[in-house]
Image (cartoon, helix red, strand yellow):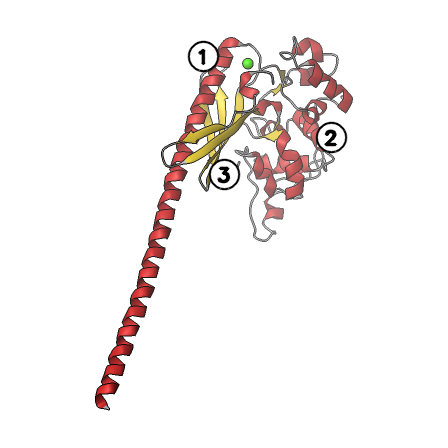
Amino acid sequence: MMMYRQRGAALITAMLIMALLAILAAELSWNNALDMRRTMSMIYHDEGTQAAYGAESWVSDMLREDARNSQNDHLGEIWAAEFPILPIESASVQGALTGEVIDLQGRFNINNLIDQNGEINQLALEQFMRLLRNLDLDPRLAGVTIDWLDPDQDTGSPLMPDGAEDSLYSSKTPPYKAANQPAMYASELMAIDGMDRATFAVLAPYITALPGKTTINVNTAPAPVLMSLDDNISLAEAEGFITERENGGFVDVQNRFKAIVSPDVLETLDDSSSFFQLKVVVQIATVRVTYYSVLHRDTGGSGMVVPVLRSFGTI
Ligand SMILES: [Ca+2]
Ligand SMILES: [Ca+2]
């Protein structure tokens, strides 16, 4: 009787050990698989990042070459064409790179709203209000944007009654402060009073945040931006401009627009650009890398191109 009991206990112990070993083995192989997956993701991410930098260098060369070959910038040029899908292939991995280059000077630069003395640029303010109206958005957002960017804490100037400063933002949950300085990213406007995601999505394709005061390239500006140059430019007229500039851009911008916009606005118009945005999306296996780079091209003859702002994922 005693012997049977001992044998029974030994059997149960042996079974327990087997079960534990099986659990341990399963966990080890699971951890191994996770480790492998993590390592591969990191490698793919690195490869994607390198491919994005490669595309940036390629586009920089293209823009430098463009400056050598042409005086103006328009949407019929090579840089403006959609990227072909470039395959990324090696022995173990397959992926693809796509991208696009946008002329940021075809957009309204929100930093034009404040001059270097921290004062409101009336011309830019009127233009931004027209842009908002053309997009069926609340033009009062222009005043809120100005307070966000200007260095002071004053709201409700007679010129611009629709402001918001720290006093308002600090009462929000969670509380925050106005930037009170030029914007680095146009998406900063997501934080201003009265802006929501849907409104920003409508506005985003037409605005940018560039350092200093910039001109508008009428060879690349979309219809809502062209309409923002003067109260009297209708949608039909803006679309007419877009057709007219199709073959190589406007022949003489100053001459073409002098009877259409005010002399002050005429001075802010251009037929070439110095700021471009490159967007690259690299997909390798299950890893996706989205890369944005703002490229500045020197207009002083050399055509040298340098990245001035790089970001992964968002802008
Ligand atoms: Ca060009
Ligand atoms: Ca302010």
Q: Is mark 2 within 8 Å of ligand 2?
A: no
Label 3: how many residues lie within 10 Å, few (<14), some (14-19) or many (20+)? few
At 43% across and 35% down in the image, what residue appears? 94
Q: What residue type is labelled 3?
A: Gly
Is residue 133 among the parts visible in the rendering? yes
Check disc 2 and report its element: helix, strand or loop: helix
Separation of marks 2 and 1 at Cα, in angstroms: 38 Å
Give the mark nearest the N terminus, 3 or 1: 1
Q: Is residue 295 left or right of residue 267?
A: left
At 46% across and 42% down in the image, what residue appears? 286
Separation of marks 2 and 3 at Cα, in angstroms: 29 Å
Q: Give 49 or 110, whichever is nearer the viewer.
A: 49
The disc placed on residue 134 is 2
The disc placed on residue 302 is 1
Q: Please tell me in which quadrant of the rendered image residue 73 appears.
A: top right
The residue identified by callout 3 is 313
Q: Which amino acid does label 2 sit on?
A: Asn
Q: Is mark 1 within 8 Å of ligand 1?
A: no
- Between circles 2 and 3, the one closer to the viewer is 3
Q: How many marks?
A: 3
At 47% across and 13% down in the image, what residue appears? 65
